[in-house]
Image (cartoon, rainbow, N blue to C red):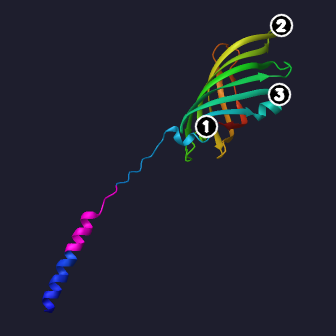
Amino acid sequence: MKKIFFIILFFLSVYTQSQVSSEEKIIKVEVVNDTSLEKLNFIGKNEIRLNAINLIVVPGLNVFYERVIDQYNGYGLSMFVNFSNPDNLLQRRFALNPYYRFYFLNKKDFGARGFFVEGFSSFASIQQEDINNSMENSFEISIGISIGSKLVNKRGFTFEWYTGVGRYLTNSELAVHVPFGLSIGKRF
């Protein structure tokens, strides 16, 4: 009798296990790395910055607009207006500077931050002293490259430093100009 009882228990346990395994469901979960701008939306894709160095030292106004393409790229335009008296031999009075940036070592979800390399051009109105010691205005075009780093906090406030060098293409007397600055801004 004990053998029959154990045989019945054995068949019941096999039967219940087969019922449980047939009712189990497999759930497939797929993790995808998303590099789109969806993660940037809570901060924004547009950024306005002000160069504090030009505002204090020159005095002049240097305002930047940048559009974030993705975590690793951005493009923009900066505008420089000089408010000081033209007492130097060479002085930029007004400039528009389009640029394109490549961001590296970007480890935050909101992107377009960290170390960057920038290619830029400059369309500038320059006042310089000519050979007769009179001031002469000229329009100059330059191209150049900059490096820097940008910090962005979770509320979208930005701080960056940058420096670079540009070469004038339209005037053989003017060799280079050196853009540099500390900028504070807001991404929206």
Magenta segment:
15-27
Closer to the chain start, of discs 3 and 2, is: 3
Viewer-side residue, 5 vs 29: 5
Viewer-side residue, 98 vs 8: 8
Which label lies toward us, 3 or 2? 3
Viewer-side residue, 94 vs 7: 7
Task: Give the residue pinned by disc 3.
Answer: 59
Callout 3 amino acid: Pro
Task: Give the residue pinned by disc 2.
Answer: 132
Viewer-side residue, 28 vs 114: 28
Task: Give the residue pinned by disc 1.
Answer: 44
Residue at x 59% of width, y 37% of height: 116
Magenta stretch: helix, strand or loop mostly? helix
Callout 2 amino acid: Asn
Q: Secondary structure at mark 3?
A: loop
Q: Residue 36, how many percent across, how many down? A: 49, 39
Task: Tell me if 39 is positioned left or right of 30 in this view.
Answer: right
